[in-house]
Image (tube, rainbow, N blue to C red):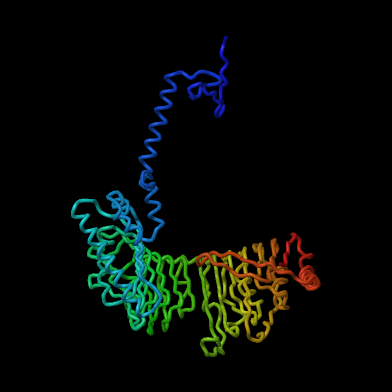
Amino acid sequence: MPRFIRSRCRNGMRLTPDGHTAASHRPIHCSRLSSAIARKILSQRHWSSAFSGDDRLSALTDDLLLLILCRLDTRTALATAALSKRWVGLTRGLDTLNFRGLYDSIMRYERHAMRAMITSINNFLDADDFHEQNNHGTWRIRTLRLEFFATQCCSCMNRLIAKAIDTWGVEDLEVSAKGTFIRKDSHSFPNRGLCNNPHMSRLRSLKLAACFIPPLQGFTALTSLVLQDLQKSTPAAAYEAICTLCPQLQVLHLKSCNNGGVVAIDAPRSEIRQLIFEDCSFKQIKMYTLPMLENLVVVNTVVKYNLSSFPYLTHLNLTICLGITKGRFCCTKDYFELNLFLGVRPGITNLVTRFTGYDRWFKPFSSTLLLPNLRKLLVADVPSSWDVSWPRLLIEAAPCLESLHINITPWEEEPCDDISWLSSEFCHNQLKELVIVGFEGTKRQIYLINFVIQASTVLQHVSLYKKGHIQYRGFWDWDIVTEQYQWDNEEKVKILKQIAENVSCQETPIQVSLE
């Protein structure tokens, strides 16, 4: 009599009497089964060996590990060299080093921070010298940044800088020193300068903050120089020598530099294309000859220039505050001519102006002002106490203007006298966009809008924002950042009605938005 054996199932497979599974559908070839089992065993051995002891980092490739190290601060990344010989090689693949020893200016922490930083840098340099002596290769660093307190024990900083330039071939160098709680000193370099062989260096950009200007002659690859927070004791001749000793420079940026004298810039052989003066306290900076200059930025700095001396100038950014202000109690009664600041420069295509003060300090007319190629104009930070229709001067001087942005900021003073404009038959054939931020619907604001609408034949958009601000992207680009505001319906209808009378007279449709 035949025996019937009940078969159990596990995951869709029948169990034989001995407890093993059997295929329920089709048989598996023996050779195919053995090869599959072998691959599985090898895979399990590989992963078990890779992840033994939870050391999953060792299973990653060098490229992935280097990406991880690049996201760590320099001190932590270099400390991983103590893990194994493999990590020593990985740390030497870093192309950017940031040594930062600045903390809050509390006296008891400054010396401790600097002692720790000096010890770390000296140990780091000694280890690098050892690797070079044992032919382990030379480190290649592209960027080096140093931030530290300026003390008398900073010789290791000069050693690190010289090593980076002479041996590692650094291209971008930033050295930022800071005075201590007791003394506001600046960092000084040795007599030889930044390195031993400047002619062989790859240094392209250099930023020095609170440092004495080192000798820069011989750095033939240097094209960008930023000097910041230089002390008043820095002689004017040191600034003047930069343009003559480094004729290959293309960008020069002076920020918060102090000097009580007059600095004259006259460099007919200079290749400087971008020149920036930002919040500098000089008696005066006189600009004579810079034949290749294309971009000029003057921010709260006394600079005397003649724009006709710069034949290739296309971008101009001016921030000037004169008259009575909260910080400086000086009165300017004589009105200036705008051509003293904007001049006659037919090549200017982009213009940014920030003219501020408790009272308008320039005349509302200029017979010689001419900007024939101006395409893009930003009139920023116009005090609400001024007659905001003054940009009409620039509009009439720029027949090719395509975009006009005006930013009005609140001002505490009483409104100034309105400008008495003469009737004009000026016709603008290029202006397509008018944007006003800080619009409040005042009489003079409405006047400026109606003037632009009447004078422009191709105007397409008029955007008026109650709340918002200008967000700058560098010195030449900006974004209009607006905030939502709910106008009162009656007020909104009244404002749009005052504008619509002129809009309806235009041949091309104009879109007016009030937000």
- In the image, what residue occupies the spot 28% across and 65% down? 121
- Which residue in the rendered view is the most extreme toward the top? 1
Position of residue 505 in the picture relative to residue 409 (left or right): right
Q: Which quarter shows the N terminus? A: top right
Q: Looking at this view, is 387 or 491 the one in front?
A: 491
The quarter of the picture where residue 360 lies is bottom right
Q: Looking at this view, is 472 or 304 the one in front?
A: 472
- Which residue in the rendered view is the most extreme toward the front? 1
**Looking at the picture, does residue 355 appear above or below residue 127?**
below
Q: Is residue 377 visible?
A: yes
Residue 371 percent across, percent down from the top left: 56, 69
Residue 60 percent across, percent down from the top left: 38, 45
Q: Looking at this view, is 213 or 174 the one in front?
A: 174
Q: Is residue 212 visible?
A: no
Residue 5 percent across, percent down from the top left: 56, 18
Q: Which quarter shows the C terminus? A: bottom right
Q: Looking at this view, is 468 or 262 the one in front?
A: 468
- In the image, what residue occupies the spot 23% across and 70% down? 192
